[in-house]
Amino acid sequence: MNKALLNALVLIAALAAGPALAQAPNPAAGGAVAEAPAAAAAPQQQAGGIKSQNIFEVKPEASADPNYLQQSNAERAKVQPGNNAPMWRQVGEGVTGYSSLPRAQAPEAGNLIQRFVQYPGSRYTNAGEAWRQVRNDWIIPYGAALLFVMLLAIAIFYFTRGAIGLHGTETGRKIERFTPFERATHWSNAIAFVTLAVSGLVMAFGKFLLLPIIGAALFGWLTYALKTVHNFVGPLFVVTLILMFITFVRDNFPTRMDLKWLAHFGGLFGGKEVPSHRFNAGEKVVFWGGILVLGSIVAGSGLFLDKLLPGFVYTRGEMQIAHMVHAVATLLMMAMIMGHIYIGTLGMKGAFSAMRHGYVDETWAREHHELWYDDIAAGKIPVQRSAEVSGAAPAKTVRVEGSPS
């Protein structure tokens, strides 16, 4: 009992003497008595992690350094712990960081944000933002205006001029204008083109026209489905485009009569139609300008966007340029084909039937393609160029009542 009481008294005495001993001068320190309070007042160091610090108490102020903006991330951390602005500035400028992936296979693996460029119609900014500006500020609004103006022009022409009909009476004698293979090639290309056009229009303009009407959920599913269809139909369109060129190139070579046809717009605005061969100058413009030139650009850029062309890495910048080229060429091609579709359906009586059934009346051939009709009458071109479906007898003995005269 006495021993326990003694231990308690010793502990109490030690606790009472602690503050006095902490403030007592250290004989071994000599003249360093005045340094003890400063040492005692030093802030305790935090263990691990980012050290908190009030930037207003940093002396001198960090931004007063003339090399402040040129500091590396490590240098900035010394004066402003936790400030990673130099790193994110380099990320925004497109500086390439370290990546363990092979540069030949993934050249952009070290870039979070693309380098600065200036596309036609954009500001000088990073490539992703520049592409967005070109698409949203130029391709979408002006592309919509182009299609609307073309549609409006067709409507005005139809309601003022009406469909182009025949001046003479049909004879009942038929001339084969398109063979079954030609019609199959044309319709396969037409179906693929319309499928791509509709899906492309929804993806480009649907956000402005359909989204407010059908809602985000249905619009999301619709665009996803159409995008998938677009990607699969695209290669089929390329194949039919090649077949279209091979099938019809022979009759689409320019002649001197085409200049006369173009000078008078084929007689569309009054008067007799300008004589032409199997295809007039307007159809040849669609063939060479739409099928060959624009069609090749659309097909090539589309295959690139589908990543079907060998020898490319397909970086973001390349895909953005391919998209802009694809969109512009597609809109121009659609505007041109709209006129072709109009003439082939509502604009000219008998034109749709010719592509559907393959035959036109003798009077139709004489009035719309007089030079082609003259060659048939002279025997240079056969009236019937393919056999009947049954193969038992040529169509001439079944469908043609007499030679054109």
Image (tube, grey):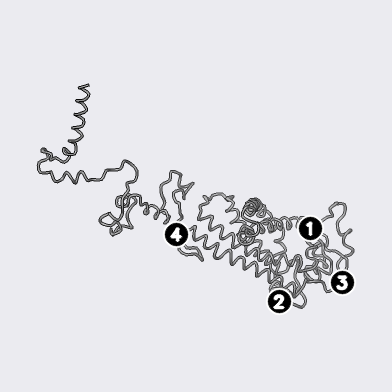
Q: How far apart, in angstroms, are the residues tagged by discs 2 and 3? A: 25 Å
Residue 69 located left or right of residue 260: left
Q: How far apart, in angstroms, are the residues tagged by discs 4 and 3? A: 67 Å
Earlier residue among tags 1 and 2: 1
Provide residue 331's location: percent of width, then percent of height. Answer: 62, 63
Question: In which quadrant of the rendered image does the C terminus lie?
Answer: bottom right
Three-letter residue code for mark 1: Thr
Earlier residue among tags 1 and 4: 4
Q: Which mark is residue 179?
A: 1
Residue 233 located left or right of residue 362: left
Q: How far apart, in angstroms, are the residues tagged by discs 2 and 4? A: 50 Å
Quarter of the view holding residue 160 = bottom right
Q: In front: mark 2 or mark 4?
A: 4
Q: Which mark is residue 264?
A: 2
Three-letter residue code for mark 2: His
Earlier residue among tags 1 and 3: 3
